[in-house]
Image (cartoon, rainbow, N blue to C red):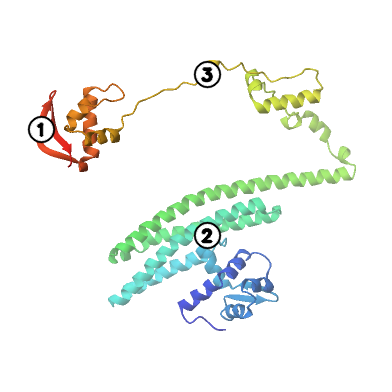
Amino acid sequence: MDSFSNIKELLSALYRERELLTEMFKMRKSASYKYEYALDLVNNDDTRIQYLMCRSVIRQNGSSLEIDDQFLQFFEQLLEANEEINTSYINENLEKITQNIDYYFNETNEQRKYQYLRTIKNTFRKTGTITLRNVVYLKRNIDNTFKNEPNYKNKRAKLLHLDSKRKNIVQLISETEGLLTADKQTFFKTATDEELNRIVVQLKIQLGKCTHNLIEIEKQIIDFLNQIQFQSSVIEKLRVIKYLKDQFTLETNTDFRSVLSENDSVIFESNPAYPLKLSLEFLQSDEDAFTSILKIAKRMKSGINLKRPVAEKISDEYLETVVQEEIQINLEEVKNGFMASGYDLFDFVLRYNFAKEVSFEERVTIYCQLVSQYENIFEITDKSEERRDVEVAMIYPKG
């Protein structure tokens, strides 16, 4: 078997065969992935499949292909698509931390000492992530088992097994918290590392979340087991009743008639009907209600001719067209007239004959608008005069 010579070669191979690996990963839980399906995704180039097989990315099982376990676990862990609860990995991390702490105290070389500290920080970081992931997987497996497992005995056995997994996680969390608090306090006081302190604080938060979730999971498992116990006992009784009925000995071997006669449970009563009375306004205005009335009338073969009420005639006043006219002042036209006149701008505006009545204040506004829009073609002098308590600049057309 060959192996990848470097990271670049590995990433290039995974990217080149991304379509094939994606399809195989989607169907990883099925029985097999046919070899001919894989050929279609690699353009019928068998050498590309052989290349992956020689480097243990995929393996062949008869006429089927599978992703190798090493790469499959890698993909599942990164995508958080794995449902396997692995508590042994947490235990291994705890042992690894304990060993590296001992190595840290025994080492005198600062560089090698830092390497042990780095390993401890990485392992602490992985421990919190893996513990949280296992709690999520545990919750998911419990829900799937209770909802999808058809066999009651297997369902109960699987739930009990998952409950033992829960107990293992609780014990490992307790050991981890003990490692953080009492057992190795000398190490945390000696290794004054800011990143280590942040990792420890984050780990304590993660473990707290796991503990709260595990308490809810324990309650859920107990509830599911009680439901299974109740359902299985009911099914066993139904099987006995079915057997006695098939043997025509139900009435002679049981007292079910007397039991039913004394039972006044709501389940034996007919479902009550609560008529809903609709308002006349709703029946007259709603389109769906009118359609339903027509269907009921046709079914009842009633001789009543139902007609939709007709609205009153719209008054002619609402149909009359009202026109409002508003006279607008054309500044362009005023400017053209000023350019052909011999007056200064303010006098011209005061004398200008507008199409509507314009007050003195409005003429001052028009004067200001003309200056702001056409100052490039006006000659604005330094002279100013006062007109009706308003001081204005003397402005003339440019020659």
Of all residues, the one furthest to the left in this rendering is: 383
Rounded to the nearest whole Å, what is the CA distance between mark 2 and mark 1? 97 Å
Nearer the observer: mark 2 or 1; the answer is: 1
Which amino acid, mark 3?
Answer: Tyr
145 lies above or below 43: above
Q: What x and y, as percent, mark residue 281? A: 63, 19
Q: Horizontally, is 384 left or right of 225 in the view? A: left
Give the residue number, with chain letter if any, for mark 2: 168
Q: CA distance from mark 2 to mark 3?
A: 82 Å
Is residue 107 visible from the viewing direction of this image? no
In the picture provided, is 129 more to the left or to the right than 73?
Answer: left
Q: Earlier in the sequence, mark 2 or mark 3?
A: 2
Locate residue 227: give its quadrant.
top right
Q: Which residue is mark 3?
A: 318
Q: Nearer the viewer, residue 67 or 213?
A: 67
Sequence-earlier tag: 2 or 1: 2
Q: Nearer the viewer, mark 1 or mark 3?
A: 1
**Picture layout, residue 31 above or below residue 111:** above
Helix, strand or loop at mark 2: helix
Q: Is residue 377 above or below residue 139?
A: above
Within 10 Å of the Cα at label 1, are there few (<14), some (14-19), or many (20+) other Cα atoms? few
Q: Amino acid at mark 1?
A: Ser
| Helix, strand or loop at mark 3 | helix
Residue at image location 72% in from the left, 30% down from the top: 266
- Mark 2 burial class by Cα count in 10 Å: few <14, some 14-19, many 20+: some
Front-lying residue, 237 or 198: 198
For the point 62% across and 76% down, the residue is: 59
Q: Where's the N terminus, which quadrant?
A: bottom right
**Where residue 384 is drawn, which disc sits there?**
1
For the point 25% across and 33% down, the residue is 337
The answer to whether mark 2 and mark 1 are in CB contact below 8 A is no
- Per the image, label 1 sits on a secondary structure element best described as strand
